Amino acid sequence: MNHKEEELKLLKDEIIQMWKLVISQLEKAKIAFLTNDVELALEIAQTEKRVNSMELKVERNCENYIALYNPVAIDLRLVLSIMKISISLERIGDYAEGIAHHIIDRDCNNIDNELIEELEIEKMFGVLLNMITNALVIFDLEETKSSRKILKKDKEVNRIYKMAFERLESYVLKNPKDALCGLKLILLIRKLERFGDHSGNIVEEIVFFLDAKVLKHKGKLE
Amino acid sequence: MIEAKNIDFYYGNFQALKNISMKIEPKTVTAFIGPSGCGKSTFLRIFNRMNDLIKDTQMEGECLINGQNIYDKSINIDNLRKDVGMVFQKPNPFPKSIFENVAYGLRVNNMGDKSFIGQRVEESLKDAALWDEVKDKLNKSAYELSGGQQQRLCIARALAVKPSIILMDEPASALDPISTSKIEELIHNLKNQYTIVIVTHNMQQAARVSDNTGFFMLGELIEYSNTKKMFLNPEKETTQNYITGRFG
């Protein structure tokens, strides 16, 4: 491996590190939400600063790499992809923090557990964690065969979002005293839905990096 | 339009070009890249028959310029080289004045009278982006110019006889970065009037100045495509390995 390749590998290792941190933030957010664990939520909020600083570091190192090594072809696509993936990961990190604040602020302390189950939030977390983890795997292995499979999972996220939104709407109408909590839960599932979109964007970036194909805005699920 | 068809070229028993075919559109810049000894300069020299001057060589195939095979017996080589000018790696002005360097091609070809030559010299120096720097010292020796200026003088000399094609064999490799960028800017501006083919070792230069790029290796044309495509998404893995520096 020559010097240039070593530097490129460092960039890749760095984004993988950030990726793993964001996945761990989400796993914690899932547990904290389902168990209403304020301590864990506080830990997530604290760790978010690390995600932000990693984004800045990745961005700066990508800029330096472009300036010093003039990458072309697959190397250029990798650096461009890493820059965009880091933006998406940072945004996903923000969502994890948002969920943590939902718990810290005790927005829905007295909400019915049955409602939470009906909203399939746990399942939504599961699908999303699966998407973002599998995206990391294909990035690391540099193998895009399963990219479409990952992208398709966003459909399931959108289905749950739509269903949960409607369920919460009727819940709030029937239980006006819980309206604030209902609204906060809508915001929370909206965050999860956006998380799905960002995971999709990340997979698209990986396909751009490895196959030089642009999937964006092309009806990727058809 | 330049069209090379199934070109093979041999230096003695060594085959330097292997069955190369390529079409070059008029008024475009085409860059040839590849490791040393890959055949890119040999292929460039096919277009104005400069290889004819090298002993013990043999060429097979056809090279058509505007539909005519330039290796046909009826071709006048002097006229061919007037139409297909060439600029070399090392600036090679003649030991004459700046004016006489540019006028040389016109004089040996008996092209026009004194005022015509004067006018053409001025035009060529302007086209080569050198006029402003030399207009007050046209009678000084060309050797007084800097390397970058000498190279632009050689370009002006090539332009003076109004070629339609200009071949450049690593025209900036002996120049400093400022002179290099002047040459690149010049290539960019000349594209409107001439077909330019450039051999370069500097891949970033190929990326900056050319519309299309051909990548050569071991006498073969590995890939020939639009430059943007070549540098973002090359078709062949060998090309990618070369342009990303993983070659060898």
Image (cartoon, coloured by chain):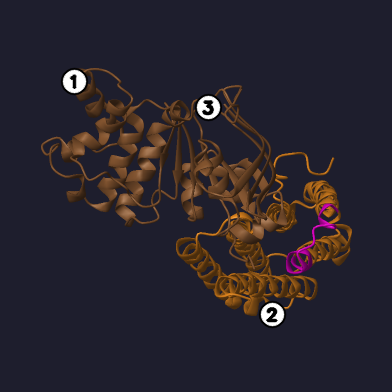
Q: Quadrant of the N terminus of chain A?
A: bottom right
Q: Quadrant of the C terminus of chain A?
A: top right
Residue at 85% of width from left, 48% of height from top? Answer: A159
Residue bearing mark 2: A40
Where's residue A13, x and y in %?
64, 74
Q: Chain of mark 3?
A: B
Kindly identify the amino acid type of the residue bearing the numbered disc 3. Pro
Residue bearing mark 1: B114
Chain B: its colour in the image is brown
Q: Quadrant of residue B102?
A: top left
Q: Chain of mark 2?
A: A
The lab-note entry on whether marks 1 and 2 share a chain reads no
> Is A82 situated left or right of A37 in this image?
left
Q: Chain of mark 1?
A: B
Camera-side mark, 1 or 2: 1
Observer-nearest of B53 and A189: B53
Observer-nearest of B179 and B231: B179
Where's residue B246, x and y in %?
63, 66
Where's residue A67, x and y in %?
45, 62
Which residue is most to the bottom?
A39
Residue bearing mark 3: B26
Kindly identify the amino acid type of the residue bearing the numbered disc 1. Lys
Camera-side mark, 3 or 1: 1
Give the alpha-carbon distance from disc 1 to disc 2, as whole Å: 91 Å
Magenta stretch, residue numbers: A136-148
